[in-house]
Amino acid sequence: MKFETLQQIRRDLHQIPELGFQEVKTQAYVLEKIQDMATERVEVAKWRTGVLVKVSGKNPSKVIGYRCDMDGLPITEKTNYTFCSTHEGRMHACGHDFHMTIALGALQHIIEHPIQDDVVILFQPAEEGPGGALPMMSSEEFKRWKPDCIFALHIAPELPVGTVSSKPGLLFANTSELFLDFVGKGGHAAYPHLTKDMSVAAGSFISQIQEIISRGIDPLDSAVLTIGKMESGHVQNAIAETARLEGTIRTLRPETIDIIKEKLESIVRGFEINFDCTITVDYGANYYQVYNHDAYVHLFKNAMKIAGITFHEANKAMTGEDFGYMLKDIPGFMFWLGVDSPFGLHNNQLQPKEESLVVGINAVVSTIGALSKS
Ligand SMILES: CC(=O)N[C@@H](CCC[C@H](N)C(=O)O)C(=O)O
């Protein structure tokens, strides 16, 4: 695919970011592009708002899987792109527009340059939440074409274009979303003694839970507890009856998430007594760690050398990815693709360099070729 075509696809997708399991326009766009390149060797299936494509090999002995994600984030874009999001309050701030474009580019390359094995490309919805990987894996469509090995990429804003990065073993953390609803008693701002102020409770709760990580978890066992959103009250001169905190828990070991949840719940019980309120805890979506299989990372490193792409050994990251569930069941790996953006993932000004699309496709097709020969 020509660079201008890839750039156009990325820009089209960038304009229509949709949240998890709402990727209706995105799915239609992806399907249209696939139809344009389809031959008799290509089969397509829809699953919810996702898409699965199978390209039959010349003499297959295995199915090679490649997965990309499709959803955007509830973030208001602040780039000055001419092709910025047309969906108010939604943005492709995690590079899924790049991931899908690379998958389409790789698909066309495989259709035009047939390999021995079957290739299945998965366009998976809802990576940012509530998690599309697990339900997709239990679908009939996935089971019918279940890959024998699988890999995926994620853009890396801090790495230069022309580079990739990965590591054997643990790459990404275990995660759990966190939603807390506080209900107390509202009232007039001038009569605090007659109320149960949920702004004060929620503010104090945020400070208190910092001690879970700093004093409750072995410093050698890394963990993160972030509250990313806080809401309470309605007006400046009334005491808030309700508050809501939204956040995420990240750990390097699956067991540590349970320890954190236990400590958090004991703080919740204390706050319910101290503030005479009720607090409901909901853990939303939970993702299993991304654990790369050694032999596949080794194969990837060699494939990158041959493709002329610079490989860096990665560090573990506290990011989460529901691709971890696929790697729990199917051998494979995930890697970072350098896109050189001055702004990071989930930033409203994320601006990955489009030249990296070509590198991404080269990395993916080279890896598929190497997997087919292995
Ligand atoms: C790569 C990346 O940024 N992934 C997301 C996954 C989010 C999972 C879930 N919504 C949570 O926040 O726990 C991330 O934020 O790491």
Image (cartoon, rainbow, N blue to C red):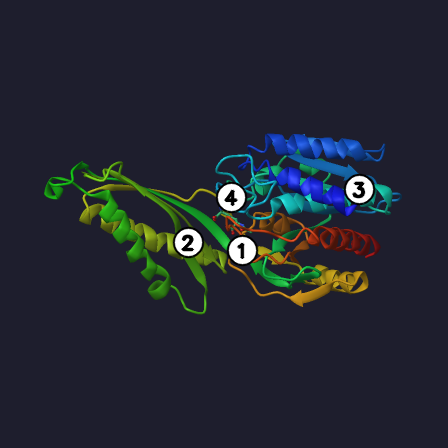
Dot 3 or dot 1, earlier in sequence = 3
Residue picked out by circle 4:
77
The kind of residue tagged 3 is: Gln
Q: Please give the name of the residue rendered at 49% of the width and 60% of the height, measured from the top-left corner.
A: 253
The kind of residue tagged 4 is: Glu
Of circles 2 and 4, which is in front?
Answer: 4
Q: Is residue 274 left or right of residue 28?
A: left
Residue picked out by circle 3:
108
Distance of label 2 from label 4 (alpha carbons) = 35 Å
Dot 4 alpha-carbon crowd within 10 angstroms: few under 14, some 14 to 19, many 20 or more:
many
Dot 1 or dot 2, earlier in sequence = 2
Q: Which residue, as the protein is rendered here, is positioned at the far right?
A: 58
Residue picked out by circle 2:
258
Of circles 3 and 2, which is in front?
Answer: 3
Residue picked out by circle 1:
344
* Proximity of marks 4 and 3: CB atoms separated by less than 8 Å: no
Distance of label 4 from label 1 (alpha carbons) = 13 Å
Above or below, 149 against 53 in this view is below
Dot 2 or dot 4, earlier in sequence = 4
* Proximity of marks 1 and 2: CB atoms separated by less than 8 Å: no
